[in-house]
Amino acid sequence: MPEFDHFTLAVVDDDYDQRYGDSRFGAYLNEHADQLDDSDCLISGAEFAALVWTVATAPTMAPGYVLTRPDLLAVTASPAEDDPADLVLRITVPLPHRALETRPGPGRWLDWENDCYQRGPWSAKVEPLPGRQPVLTLTADILLPIPASELSTPPVPLPRTELTRTAKRTVARLAEHVNTHGGPAVAALLGGGR
């Protein structure tokens, strides 16, 4: 079971991946290998990182090779819009009403609720059903840029075993980046804990 804390937002679960011998992550990568094997063009480091992160995380792979803290709405990767050679990691955080300087009024507005099926300090957040009360949910997006110079561009096509090794190294570096740079920002947004 992954160990999340205030600063650990993403965990690589290599033990579970290898539990039955072959790599589950490797099998999922093989299903998406056609996106890497276009011999007419080289895939950039950002495109490779975004693809393997997407494959490694839910909902593509469930449970994911990379597990993200359940109280976060998403941790995604994509090439940067201004320079597609760079990568952007996006952490989407549900914010409670207490983050507002002033609260909406009049009356009581519903806020994010804990998922009743996931208990614990990092339980998933769900939108409440409005019923007869209004709902206001807030989110913050933390964008973490990674310049192209810090990304590895894999040679294409890669043999399947090398593809899995390269992808595992890539997502481990991305998870470390999320934790190192995004963990403190999320902790500050949420007041250091729940």
Image (cartoon, rainbow, N blue to C red):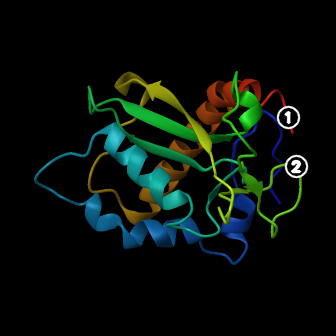
Residue assigned mark 2 = 121
- Quadrant in which the C terminus appears: top right
115 sits left or right of 38 in the view:
right
User: How far apart in space, not on screen, are marks 1 and 2 (Cα)?
Assistant: 8 Å
Compare residues 136 and 152 and report the one nearer the observer: 136
Q: Do the numbered discs 1 and 2 sit on residues whose CB atoms are within 8 Å? A: yes
Residue sitting at 70 percent across and 41 percent down?
Answer: 9
SS of the residue at dot 2? Answer: loop
The quadrant in which residue 152 appears is: top left
Q: Is residue 9 left or right of residue 148?
A: right
- Residue 158 occupies quadrant: bottom left
Q: Nearer the viewer, residue 180 or 36?
A: 180
Mark 1 vs 2, N-terminal side: 2
User: From the viewer's perspective, is 40 left or right of 102?
Assistant: left
On the image, the x and y values in percent for residue 65 come to 62, 60
Label 1 SS: loop
Q: Is residue 179 above or below residue 55?
A: above
Residue 150, relative to residue 27: is it above or below?
A: above
Q: Position of residue 36 (x, y in %)?
A: 28, 57
Q: Disc 1 designates what residue?
A: 193
Work out whether residue 148 can be spotted: yes
Which residue is rendered at x = 39% and y = 23% of the image? 147
Residue shown at 70%/38% (left/top)?
A: 106
Q: Residue furthest bottom?
A: 20
